Image (cartoon, helix red, strand yellow):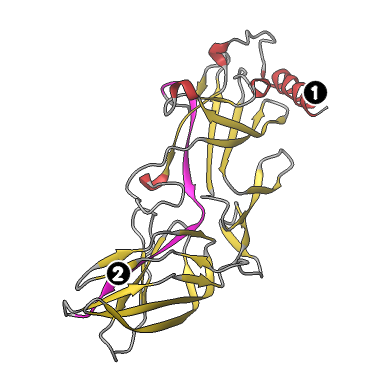
Amino acid sequence: MKKIFIAFAALAAFAACNKAEVVDVTPDNLIGFDAPFVDNATKALGEKDYSGSKELTGFKVYGTVAGNSATVNLFDGVQIDRNEKDFGVAWDYADETDKQYWLPSCSYSFAAVVDGTVADKDANGMPTELSYKVGEGDLLYATATATTNESGVPTGVNSNNCVAFTFDHLISKVYFTFVNGFDSDAYQYKVNEVTISGFAAEGTYTIEDEEWDLGDEPTENPLSFGTPGVLAKGATVTSDTDHLIIPGTQTVTINFTYDVIFKGEAISQMTVSKTLTNQVFDQETVYNINVTLPALGNEIQFTVTDVPGGFATGGDINI
């Protein structure tokens, strides 16, 4: 029944848009989607290399078509995937029955979502709220518009006559950098598993207000950043893992232990537990938590430097 309804909706939209009452529906006027761009040329899925653009494999499209008397839902979470035969260039409908075509004298609105879930829609089926749970991937969102003339030729599309999305990251990212602050070749530090507890497990993003509402429950388990390993004199090491988190003001606790190694032998183990109270994590920002391990007897100092920006830059949290 759902597919039948969509078919009738498309016919209704056609009737509303078509001034000439006759149009040839051919592959030439198929509504196509072309290589999307992730803003700030940033990896999209939890990787520490923030300099390149992650090859997305697919996204869901929502959209409407409006004529001179009606606005009709045209796409309702339609899956668009890369064409395996032409990976990295061509995109196509995952289901052939979802294909739609440009209609004359109409205006179109599109929205695209990667990961997360559409939690609410408006009367025309366009997303108004997105929900996200930590661990679901990199929540990306984009919009686009287009119009067609009396011949059904679209404007607002790219040179391939395709809808091209520019995605924004709606979440934040966190990782660690450790530095050996002991100025001696005889001493090394071995950093053991690093975790953060207290991050909100889920949240809801209101698209119109561009605001997050955090859930009350933290993640079931602390987020683990792996075991960075041994740091020689002056060495710097980055955590094995980074984590995508929900933006907002959060109180979280960092925990790890490190072994003090003297002339190849572990002579003591130190425990670090630091709570960041009401720490702000801005949307589309990478936070590098910097930890300088001190000489024996020196207190570990914590400072937070917030440098918001795109995922390509970031914020520093110095410990």
The residue sitting at the bottom extreme is: 297
Q: Residues within 10 Å of mark 1 (few under 14, many from 20)?
A: few
Is 85 above or below relative to 220? above
Percent position (x, y) of residue 315? 37, 65
Provide the secondary structure element on which disc 2 rests: strand
Which residue is found at the position 66% from the left and 10% from the top? 20
**What range of the chain is rendered magenta?**
159-182
Would residue 161 be seen by someone viewing this image from the given angle? no
Would residue 279 be seen by someone viewing this image from the given angle? yes
Looking at numbered disc 2 in the image, what kind of residue is underneath it? Val
Looking at numbered disc 1 in the image, what kind of residue is underneath it? Ile
Which sits in the foreground, 293 or 86? 293
Relative horizontal placement of residue 200, taking residue 292 as reference (left or right): right
Is 111 above or below relative to 157? below
Is 59 above or below relative to 101? below
Which residue is identified by label 2? Answer: 230
Tag nearer the camera, 2 or 1 = 2
Provide the secondary structure element on which disc 1 rests: helix
Which residue is identified by label 1? Answer: 4
Which residue is found at the position 57% from the left and 30% from the top? 80
